[in-house]
Image (cartoon, rainbow, N blue to C red):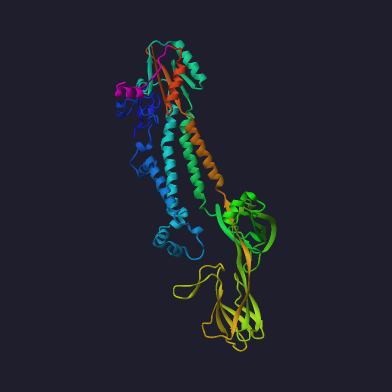
Amino acid sequence: MKDVKCECGHVNPHGTVLCEACGKVLDEQSKNQPLLDMRYEGSARRSQTYNKTIVDKIWNFFSSVKVGVWLIVITLVASAAGTILPQEMYIPPTMPAEEYYEDQYGWFGKLYYELDLNNLYSSWWYLILIAMIGISLVICSLDRVVPLYKALKAQRVTRHEGFLKRQRLFGISVNGDQDDLTIVRERLKAKRYHVREENGDILAEKNRFSRWGPYVNHVGLIIFLIGGMLRFVPGMYIDSVLWLREGETKVVPETDGQYYVKNEKFILENYDKEKEKTFEAAIDRAGMVVKNYQTNAVLYKRVGPAIAGEQPELEKVKEHKIRVNQPLKFERFALYQVDYKLDELNTMSFSLTDKETAKTFGDIKVNLYDPKPRYDLGNGYAVEVLSFFPDFEFSESGEPTTKSRIPNNPAFVFKMISPEVPKGETSFVAIQQTIEPLGDNQYKMAFKGIETKNVTALTVRKDLTIWIIVLGGILFMIGVIQGAYWNHRRIWVQNKNGEIWIAAHTNKNWYGLKKEIETTLLETKLTIPIDQVQRETNDKEGV
């Protein structure tokens, strides 16, 4: 498409409404408008000029503000839908997610899972929505900021008569002289205007930087979105929970087996009503108010390579008392105190006992997290663990099953071997329940006692995206402040055949601009420009 050459000699891109240099109206439709649309200085925007190729159509689609708003609305609605039911990361690991949602929430839970709302914020379609918002921000900004910058940079001091007449603030003075122009120029400089002169004409301008506020805002949003999407790149963001029993040592997730942490002891302290009178009412109401959650932890680092099937050699790195908001930090990781469980079942003890004589033939202690398949008691006596159900319940078919791997309600199927019954007797043993499915047995597993341990939950967190998100947030706020608290003001003062023409424009706060012009023209023979919008309103109302 051909460029458009103005009578002033400036060559404008095709689609330009106002000459970038002198401001003459180049578009026929705009010539009939009483006031000029100065939003983008009448510059040629690609989205309003080209619409032939597939690239043009994609550009035009994403450059639409309406499209951007609808993308944001759709994303907000989707985000809200993701909060209706808990996300999968927050549901108990008792059963597959598909079964859990249907079991807990019925047909709605099943639909929720099938629509992938259970992992909404990492789903492919949600990430596509975020990416489309980012693309829309980039294209919207480029479609407007580049031609706007070129137009403002190319503007001349002397402007076309039609440009001046069709500004909102415009006036003509017939009694002005050169002394008045000198006074106006000096007063404008005193008000921190950047004053340019050309052939006796004046252009006073200030706060042009405020026009870039929305685009700085967009850049901040784009960086913020990039930071958010980088959280789904492996290794950039980690937020997982590690459960540790007292005395237990586990590898820290996502450290490639390099670091281990041990729970030496978990401490829970409550406020004493007698000593802390401030919490007396809260203690009476709740029964208990926690003062401190604390895990005495030891961090280890593996020495040498990892060898499958062998215990790693560990070197102590440091000890730390992990409390709320006092994490254990190492490299780029941090371990936060997040949850706990008191007195969780750890071991159960049984005695192999003759039912008639009550004589015992040995004791066994079963580790509920790692039960042995066989316990030899000597003299021909032994106990085998045929089945173990950590969280026992009966299924719909009446078969024993487990809800989870946590020993909340342990149950066993024991095979009791003795010299009298070398093939063994089978017994189903649960808490306060014993079943002999193959008939009466001579022996039974008599319950002796349990041991419990406190369990702590530590959040393992690593965030390499936080600085990107913070940078985006800072730029966003800079753009908001830049565009909200300053406004771009321009005042044109020109000598047209002995008459002094004054026109002015601002992107907002017309009242402030009017007052500034009034004080500038005070005690001069120049006429204060008229607000043509207000005059038109008064004419319609008959004022």
Q: Which residues are magenta?
A: 525-543
Residue at image position (51%, 47%) is: 227
Residue 107 at x, y percent in the picture = 39, 62
Q: Quadrant of the N terminus?
A: top left
Q: Pick the residue in front: 24 or 33.
A: 33
Q: Is residue 103 on the magenta stretch?
A: no
Q: Quadrant of the C terminus?
A: top left
Please give left or right for residue 378 compared with residue 196 in the image: right
Residue at image position (50%, 40%) is: 220
Is residue 50 visible in this depiction of the protein? yes
Is residue 332 visible in this depiction of the protein? no
Residue 204 at x, y percent in the picture = 46, 21
Q: Is residue 536 on the magenta stretch?
A: yes
Residue 278 at x, y percent in the picture = 63, 49
Q: Quadrant of residue 495?
A: top left
Please give left or right for residue 279 compared with residue 542 in the image: right
Residue at image position (54%, 43%) is: 470
